[in-house]
Structures are given as C-alpha cells and as structure tokens.
Image: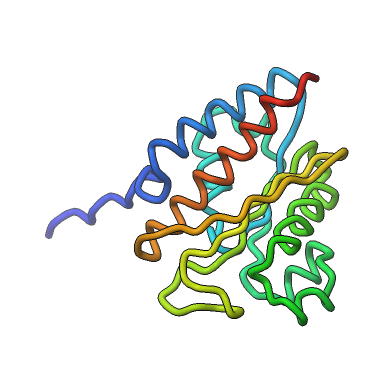
Amino acid sequence: MAAAPEPPSSAWFVSETAHDLAEQILARLRARGHTVAVAESLTGGLVAAALTDIPGASASFRGGVVTYATELKAALLGVDPVMLARHGAVYAPVAAAMAAGVRQRLGATFGVATTGVAGPEPADGQPVGTAHVAVSAEDDTVVRTIALTGDRHGIRRLAVEHALGLLLGRLGEDSG
C-alpha cells in the first residue's frame, strides 16, 4: 500500500512574496512591541496563515477572525448592519470597519482586513477581482481598493500580498 501523500505546505496556500512580507512585518512588530490581528472574508484565513507560518509569530500575532458570512461581520467585528444591508460586504468602509473591529476586539496594535470577490461570479454588485484591504491603528485606518485579475486562487493570493504590503507600508510610516 502506498503511503499517503504529504499535505501541501503553507507555501502552496500563500506565495513566496507573502511569506517574505510576513517575515518583515513580524520582525518590525516584534522590535517595537506591537501586535496584529486579522479579519478576513475574501482571503478566508490566508493572511493569518502567512503570518503564522513564520517561526516566532506568536510574539506579535494576536489572532484572526474569518467572517465569510456577511452577518458575522456585524456580530463579531461590529460592522454596522445598516451599512452591510445598504452596500453589501464588498465595500471599502466595510473593510475599514472590519480592520478596526478586529484590532479592538483582539486587543492588537494593528488590525488588517480583507473583503472582496474572488469569483467565479460577481457579488454585491461588484465584479470578480474587486478587493478591499484595510489596516487600522489607533490613530487611523487606511483602505485600498484594488482590481485583481486571475482565477479564484490567484485573486485570493494577490489579496493576501496587498493586505500584507499595506500593513508593511504602515509599519514603515510608524516611527514608534
């Protein structure tokens, strides 16, 4: 009987770029005594996977919440249910609220959020490839809206890279 194949490494789930970004992020967070928490919809836990793939991540990674269902964004992260009903989950202010909500609820210095449409069909009136990534700190929240191309897997991987890149950029601005 043949041995069962080994499960894919997390590198299969996240790109080498995401892995490199996660290493840089965690080194900066650790050096400053800061922490991060993630709220994911579009990426379904891949941002958390990229961060926790790095040895020593527990020094700075507080945790994550995958709120794939729209109502969980309100229930678990405090996103305004009226905003969700009016605009849907694929909306830049929803990403901002998710990032702020996870930062506050998990007691982190920074919150990161992803929401969007990986496909195969449009959602919330938004085309496939629409993504919103956000980073929240106590003093500000930054959101980027991006139009990604590729298949479902590729869109999700690119969204992870954009979310981590946004956080790394924010950490570069942080002098303390």
Question: Going by the image, does 99 lie left or right of 90?
Answer: right
Question: Going by the image, does 87 lie left or right of 156?
Answer: right
Question: Going by the image, does 3 lie left or right of 109?
Answer: left
Residues 44 and 157: in front is 157
Residue located farthest toward the left when viewing the structure as drawn? 1
Residue at left offset 38%, top offset 56%: 154
Q: Is 103 drawn above or below residue 132 in the view shown?
A: above
Residue at left offset 58%, top offset 47%: 48
Residue at left offset 55%, top offset 40%: 52
Residues 24 and 121: in front is 121
Instruction: State the quadrant of the C terminus.
Output: top right
Residues 110 and 139: in front is 139
Displayed quadrant of residue 142: top right
Question: Going by the image, does 67 lie left or right of 74?
Answer: left
Residue at left offset 83%, top offset 52%: 105
Instruction: State the quadrant of the N terminus.
Output: bottom left
Q: Is 136 drawn above or below residue 59 in the view shown?
A: below
Q: How many marks?
A: 0
Displayed quadrant of residue 171: top right
Image coloring type: rainbow
Q: Position of residue 160 (x, y in %)?
A: 51, 48
Displayed quadrant of residue 36: top right
Q: Position of residue 174 (x, y in %)?
A: 75, 25
Q: Position of residue 2 (x, y in %)?
A: 13, 57
Q: Position of residue 31 (x, y in %)?
A: 70, 18
